[in-house]
Amino acid sequence: MHLLISRRFLPLFLTQALGALVDNLFRNAIVVLVILSDPHAGASLVALAGGIFILPYVLFSALAGRLADRHDKATLIRITKVSELAVMAAAGAALISGSHAAMLGVLFGLGVQATFFGPLKYAILPDHLAAPELLDGNALIEAGTFAAILIGTSIGGVLAAGTLFSSVDGAEAAAAGGLLVSAAGLAAAWFIPPAPPTALPEQTAAAGWNLFAGTVSLIAEARRNRRGWICSLGISWFWTLGAILLAQLPVVGARLLGADGEVVTLLVTMFTIGIGAGSLLAGRLAPAPALGRIPRVVIWAGLGMTLACLDFAWTCTGASPALGWTTVRSLLAAPAAWRLLLDLLLVATCGGVFSVPLYALLQAGAAPAHRARAVAASNVLNAIWMAAGSGIAAALPAAGVGPAGIIALAAIVNTAAVAWLRGVSKKAVLF
């Protein structure tokens, strides 16, 4: 926790947290405003919005990693935050105008900004933190990010619905809130210490400006780096499992429990809190990444995710509107319902413990001249795996598989992934 009062870390922490907050504020504001105006269009827009936000990671991650390795990372972070402020100004106009096309365009712009910021925020940590501090640094970044996601989602919904300032239009309130948060993030970025380039121009020229060729080259380079590839695959599976679970929570709430939106929000909140708690816990449980092995606690956390997912799926099989868990009050009043909440908390906490050491290993094991591109490659894999996993999960209901079955299948795949990681960790030191 001493890092939170250090200039080496605090400005980056605030910059990242405020960036995650403004992204989710805008996204949830879109959801609320569109659904309030047209519920039928809202459902389609929400589904489209997720893909639009992820697409830039596939298109631009190679270029983002290349630039991050070639230039001062602190300077680039400030540039990305200036661009974010410009995008949020456009976001305000889009929200006030009510144009769905403009909202999606702004969402794509935020995705581009996040794509270029992603390699910077992780690659800069080893520049400012000693190896033993990397776990704590990553843990705080992850915990702060998920706390910001939760706060941003809540604020975006409240502002857009017009319940906070009854005298101000919801779109205008959300637009002003987004601009203020983005400006605060830019101010924090100005205090990040310099982080000179770690690669020579000739070391990064191969990627070029061809987006497709750059992405293919980035993945090929990542595969040649065994340690980075293993960590990236583990991280990508974590995000895929999380995406599948989060996609099923609204279905569990609406179809199995017959519950209102507040119950679904509570389920998502439990998951978010668990990720943050697990991230902080990882900093206490895992050894320093310089040791070069996948920590045993990662394997145990992976098994914990499996058990919690299976128990959640089993509990869902007995759920029905007849149980009366239709509101937050009735849910919390039923002792049996707490099993669902605790399962979500446990799977998310184990997920935080699982992912944070892998991020630290990825950073510590990558050569300084290639560190940002290693992170960028991991981001591309995350986007591809999440899209593929979410697509498969979306297709399973057509085959008669319900939400409990989808979560159980994800738990089985998770067991295989953890067994693979255990086999890798027993064979040899990663670096």
Image: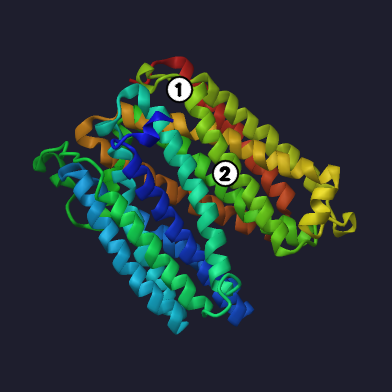
Where residue 250 appears, x then y in whole percent?
A: 68, 59
Instruction: Name the residue type under label 2.
Output: Leu
| Residue drawn at the location 55% of the way across and 56% of the way down | 391
Q: Residues within 10 Å of mark 2 (few under 14, many from 20)?
A: many
Most foreground residue, 153 or 317 = 153
Identify the image quadrant of residue 273: top right
Density class for disc 1 (Cα within 10 Å; few <14, some 14-19, many ≥20) is: many
Which image quadrant for residue 321? bottom right
Visible residue check, residue 61:
no
**Quadrant position of residue 135:** top left
x 65%, y 46%: residue: 270
- Pick the front one: 7 or 361: 7
In terms of sequence position, does the residue under pointer 2 or pointer 1 come before the other?
2
Q: Which mark is residue 346?
A: none
Where residue 237 sits: x, y (%)?
51, 40
Q: Would you say 147 lies left or right of 59 here?
A: right
Q: Is residue 11 visible?
A: yes
Quarter of the figure with the C terminus: top left
Q: Is residue 286 above or below residue 409?
A: above
Q: Position of residue 147 (x, y in %)?
A: 52, 47
Measured in 3D between alpha carbons, the distance from the residue under mark 2 to the one under mark 1, in whole angstroms, is 20 Å
The residue most toward the right is 322
Instruction: Identify whether 133 is placed above or below 236.
Output: above
Q: Residue at 25% of width from left, 46% of height from top?
A: 191
Q: Which residue lies at the image location 58% right of the left edge and 31% below the top edge?
A: 416
Secondary structure at numbered mark 2: helix
Q: Secondary structure at mark 1?
A: loop
Residue bearing mark 1: 294
Q: Is residue 37 above or below residue 227?
A: below
Q: Which residue is mark 2?
A: 241
Q: Quadrant of the N terminus?
A: top left
Q: Position of residue 361 (x, y in %)?
A: 38, 28
